[in-house]
Amino acid sequence: MQKPVAPLLKTLVFTILVPGTMAGYVPWRLRQNAAIALTGAHDGAALAVIAIGIAIYLYTAFWGFALIGGGTPAPIAPTKILVVKGLHRFVRNPMYIGVGLVVGGQAWLSHSLPIAIYLACFGLAVHLFVVLYEEPTLRKQFGEEYERYRERVPRWMPRFRL
């Protein structure tokens, strides 16, 4: 069995390179040097959205994929098992949701139309990647186990029952 250090380190490198670029560097560049002045409650709410997005990503990437799944979020080093615990009980793609919340929170915080447009493009690109690549790959890798999971858990929007 692989020691958990390797998947954790690989996940750290992936996180810096991919989500770090997509949710950090690109929105920062799109702000076009606009200053962010924290002036009201809505700024606190935007910061909370960003913090929640970061927490969702870190929890699912490091605990779910690296420690439980023995792999990484990167397609070149996938998990060894199908991760269905944690936030994956509610939606199949919580990491993408977390990254989207980080980008959306930045659009809100900086009142940036370019970042909002980027968020829409990011969302479309992620959806197409999930539908055209990830889901067929998981179907091949995990077969009936993935099919049962796919039928039970929604792709994007959790089903909360009261």
Image: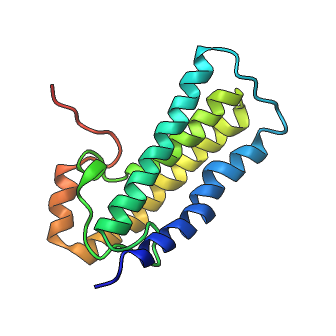
Question: Which picture quadrant has residue 34?
Answer: top right
Which residue is found at the position 76% from the left and 28% from the top? 36
Which residue is found at the position 42% from the left and 59% from the top? 61
Q: Residue furthest top?
A: 40
Expressed as whole percent of the image width and height from the top left, the position of residue 122 reads 57, 49
Which residue is found at the position 62% from the left and 28% from the top? 108
Which residue is found at the position 77% from the left and 38% from the top? 31
Expressed as whole percent of the image width and height from the top left, the position of residue 79 reads 34, 73
Instruction: Classify residue 112 as left or right of residue 55.
Output: right
Expressed as whole percent of the image width and height from the top left, the position of residue 8 reads 44, 70
**Closest to the observer: 44 or 148?**
44
Quadrant (top left, top right, bottom left, bottom right) of the C terminus: top left
Instruction: Classify residue 25 as left or right of residue 2.
Output: right
Expressed as whole percent of the image width and height from the top left, the position of residue 24 reads 66, 49
**Closest to the observer: 152 or 28?**
28
Instruction: Classify residue 121 as left or right of residue 35.
Output: left
